């Protein structure tokens, strides 16, 4: 390289390249020592370009801004990433925050580096309604770029990690916001990509930022574990090492302490104190081959008794991120459980670095189970969902759902393994198989038994989906699916098949509201409707009607504007009594329950055909139907302009959810008797929950499906006839 770089002169950086390098650059070069001499020289050049571009910019900590992107590159160098990723990391903020352009970067370092920088760049230059929307759109852009090159997310994770390490310079509010975002999005992404070391550090740093006192107290208690427990762990380690060596098994035995965040989560989830969380310590056994893993498992089980039901084989059935290991929990001295993980060196590398291992160690990079392959499949599914989401916020919501840390592993009848989020239902499984299978699903066969689509699944079950060409998605499905793919596919299909329903309902609602002004769409003065549509930027009337049905436009206000009145008159109705309904029109809107996507039924009171009902206009949801005696209606009296006078059409069909509170004798076989009585009345049971339970009496909640109030009455009569039943009432 020349003594000075003329290209940098315009940026104010023309110092000789043989001048001593700053300590932070030396640290980067030391971490990146695996690169060639030519690549290291180019890395120094990238720093020079970045330093010139960021000249005069400072971090909130008071350090020159360039120290941050160089630190990000160092994080990636410690993961063994390639030169292009490190160069892009050094330059990742230049396009966003400096005059340097992507074209200049491409000319100097190649198109790949420029594309990586572009993928990481946020959308701050665009205008959004709020910070949430901006963050969501930025996130969507990042994932789109990530689908083209996974190194984008590696840079973003390293960027977030360094920002978390230096979070102290931010305000208290910013620290909490960034920490929450880290826990909700970035740590789960790191886990989804198999990068457990990065995930664990992000979680602990976020925990320390959100709850500094709790973190400090917990970390101190972990360090100061009772001496007797520490001595026991040393004894366990010695015994395990001795037994493994005795069998002639080449191994590495590593003792470890769980992180403060993982212990804190366990304390919260299991409602335990630190003293009650006994498995703070654990061991990892690293061996040479897969066969050695199972050999080592036998050895540790002979040394200490395993706890029943606590063994997991992630080698035979890897996690969705490619993680492989044997997990077992042993019954140690003093009754403390000991978690032991057993895996090969390659599995350990993948467990710690995830997809980053592909660039540092090329082994197994193309295999179907490699983190890279699995991450690419996951992203492909996300991109499929991207096409069906209407907004960045919806897309972000779906991604968050798919980032659940816990999974269930299920089998198709042909033996294919599918991983789904915890609490996944048979319907989630149907959409995981194929979107068309989900759209036409009728019921499911789990381990040979027919079950409803809302049934939750457990690991190891074999699931077969029964379909029918005439079946189609229902709005109720959105209430129990948990996977982002299923939710997006249902919403997309409902939008397609529900548009006509929305238009028809919106027309009825607008006509009803116009009646208060002795008007109708046909009677409006010539040109008034077209003028209103143009002012509100609706391409046609159908779009306005659909918006009304979905709750995005109040029919009362639209009618007021079209009739030539003052919208303030309509707004003045807020807070008026129930009689304000009369102003919405004389005709009650009759519903069949089949108005997909625009009519839903409130879970608080679960209305069914035959009930006296009213509707409440809710933005984005359409009309939510409540029973007239619903206790929540008192809250809605403050907004009578959102009320919709609805009733049941004579042509109502289908099953509707409701709940029964049943008081019974507390003795064996009672639950079966009540369930049989409900079944005899031709009603399906969706859920069963014990509300109260003592020595003699139990109170059980049954979630059931009925056709109407007459059908419900029949169910109640049959249940009441049972001698073991003390009382039945609808909830």
Image (spheres, helix red, strand yellow):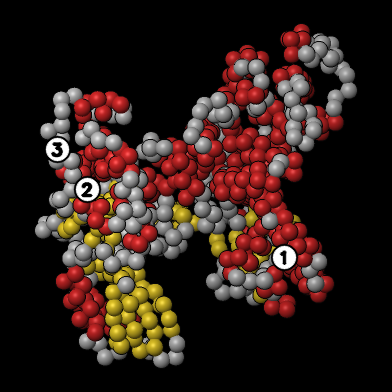
Label 2: few (<14), some (14–19) or many (≥20) C-alpha neighbours in 10 Å: many
| Circle 2 residue | 584
Q: SS of the residue at dot 2? A: helix
The mark that comes first in sequence, 1 or 2, is 1
* Quadrant of res 542: top left
Residue 313 relative to residue 286: left or right: left
Q: Is residue 368 visible?
A: no
Q: Are marks 1 and 2 in contact (CB under 8 Å)?
A: no
Within the image, what quadrant is residue 262 found in? bottom right
Q: Residue at x 58, y 66 (%)?
A: 269
Q: Is residue 523 above or below residue 277?
A: above
Residue 322 lies, in percent from the top left, at 55, 48
Q: Name the residue carrying label 3.
A: 520
- Where is the N terminus found, in terms of image quarters? top right
Residue 281: mark in rendering:
1
Residue displayed at 34% across by 66% down: 631
Query: Could you classify mark 3 by the number of other residues whose Cα lies within 10 Å: few (under 14), some (14-19), or many (20 or more)?
Result: some
Q: Please, is residue 248 above or below residue 663 in the view?
A: above
Dot 2 or dot 3, earlier in sequence: 3
Q: Position of residue 327 (x, y in %)?
A: 60, 62
Under tag 3, what secondary structure? loop
In the rendered structure, the answer to whether residue 355 lies left or right of residue 541 reads right
C-alpha span from label 1 to label 3 = 74 Å
Number of numbered tags placed on the structure image: 3
Mark 1 or 3: in front is: 3
What is the C-alpha distance between the residues marked 2 and 3?
13 Å
Q: Looking at this view, is 257 or 613 the one in front?
A: 613
- Give residue 107's position: percent from left, percent from top: 63, 13
């Amino acid at each position: 390289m020349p003594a000075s770089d003329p290209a940098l002169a315009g940026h104010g950086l023309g110092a000789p390249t043989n001048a001593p390098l700053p300590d932070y650059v030396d640290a980067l070069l030391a971490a990146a020592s695996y690169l060639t001499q030519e690549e290291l020289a180019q890395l120094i050049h990238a720093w020079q370009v970045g330093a010139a571009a960021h000249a005069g910019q400072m971090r909130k900590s008071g350090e020159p801004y360039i120290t941050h992107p160089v630190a990000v590159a160092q994080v990636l160098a410690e993961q063994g990433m390639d030169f292009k990723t490190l160069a892009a990391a050094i330059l990742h903020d230049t396009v966003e925050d400096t005059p340097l352009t992507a074209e200049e970067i491409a000319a100097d370092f190649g198109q790949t580096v420029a594309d990586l920088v572009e993928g990481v760049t946020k959308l701050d230059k665009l205008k959004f309604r709020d910070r949430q929307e901006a963050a969501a759109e930025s996130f969507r852009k990042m994932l789109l770029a990530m689908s083209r090159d996974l190194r984008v997310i590696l840079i973003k994770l390293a960027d977030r990690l360094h920002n978390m390490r230096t979070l102290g310079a931010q305000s208290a509010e910013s620290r909490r916001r960034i920490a929450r975002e880290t826990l909700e999005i970035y740590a789960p992404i790191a886990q989804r990509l198999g990068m457990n070391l990065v995930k664990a550090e992000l979680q602990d740093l976020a925990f320390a930022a959100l709850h500094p006192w709790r973190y400090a107290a917990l970390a101190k208690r972990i360090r100061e574990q009772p001496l007797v427990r520490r001595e026991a762990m040393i004894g366990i380690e010695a015994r395990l090492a001795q037994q493994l060596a005795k069998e002639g098994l080449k191994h590495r035995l590593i003792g470890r302490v769980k992180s403060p965040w993982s212990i804190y989560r366990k304390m919260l989830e299991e409602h335990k104190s630190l003293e009650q969380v006994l498995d703070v310590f654990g061991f990892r056994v690293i061996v040479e081959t897969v066969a050695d893993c199972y050999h080592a498992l036998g050895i540790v089980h002979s040394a200490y008794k395993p706890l029943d039901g606590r063994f997991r084989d992630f080698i035979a059935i890897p996690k969705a991120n490619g993680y492989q290991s044997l997990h077992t929990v042993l019954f140690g001295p003093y009754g403390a459980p000991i978690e032991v993980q057993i895996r090969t060196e390659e599995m350990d590398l993948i467990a710690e670095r995830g997809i980053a291992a592909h660039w540092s160690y090329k082994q197994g990079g193309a295999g179907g189970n490699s983190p890279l392959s699995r991450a690419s499949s996951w992203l492909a599914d996300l991109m499929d969902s991207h096409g069906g989401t209407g907004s960045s916020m919806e897309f972000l919501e779906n991604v968050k759902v798919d980032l659940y840390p816990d999974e269930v592993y299920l089998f198709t009848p042909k033996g294919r393994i599918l991983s789904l989020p915890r609490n996944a239902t048979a319907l989630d499984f149907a959409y995981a198989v194929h979107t068309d299978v989900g759209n036409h699903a009728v019921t499911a066969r789990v381990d040979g038994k027919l079950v409803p689509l809302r049934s939750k699944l457990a690991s190891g079950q074999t699931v077969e989906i029964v379909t029918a060409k005439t079946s189609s998605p229902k709005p109720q499905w959105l209430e129990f699916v948990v996977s982002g793919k299923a939710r997006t596919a249902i919403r997309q299909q409902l939008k397609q098949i529900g548009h006509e329903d929305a238009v028809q309902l919106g027309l009825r609602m607008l006509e009803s509201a116009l009646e208060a002004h002795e008007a109708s769409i046909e009677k409006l003065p010539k040109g008034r409707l077209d003028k209103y549509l143009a002012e509100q930027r609706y391409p046609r009337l159908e779009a306005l009607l659909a918006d009304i049905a979905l709750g995005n436009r109040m029919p009362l206000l639209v009618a007021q504007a079209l009739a030539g009145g003052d919208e303030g008159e309509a707004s003045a109705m807020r807070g008026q009594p129930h009689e304000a309904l009369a102003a919405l029109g004389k005709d009650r809107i009759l519903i069949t329950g089949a108005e997909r996507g625009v009519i839903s039924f409130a879970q608080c009171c679960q209305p069914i055909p035959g009930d006296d009902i009213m509707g409440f206009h809710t933005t984005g949801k359409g009309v939510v139907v409540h029973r007239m005696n619903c206790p929540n209606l008192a809250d809605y009296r403050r907004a009578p302009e959102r009320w919709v006078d609805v009733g049941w059409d004579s042509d109502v069909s289908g099953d509707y959810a409701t709940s029964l509170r049943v008081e019974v004798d507390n003795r064996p076989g009672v639950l079966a008797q009540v369930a049989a009585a409900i079944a005899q009345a031709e009603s399906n049971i969706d859920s069963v929950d014990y509300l109260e339970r003592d020595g003699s009496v139990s109170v059980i909640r049954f979630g059931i499906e009925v056709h109407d109030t007459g059908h419900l009455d029949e169910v109640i009569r049959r249940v009441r006839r049972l001698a073991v039943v003390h009382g039945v009432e609808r909830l």
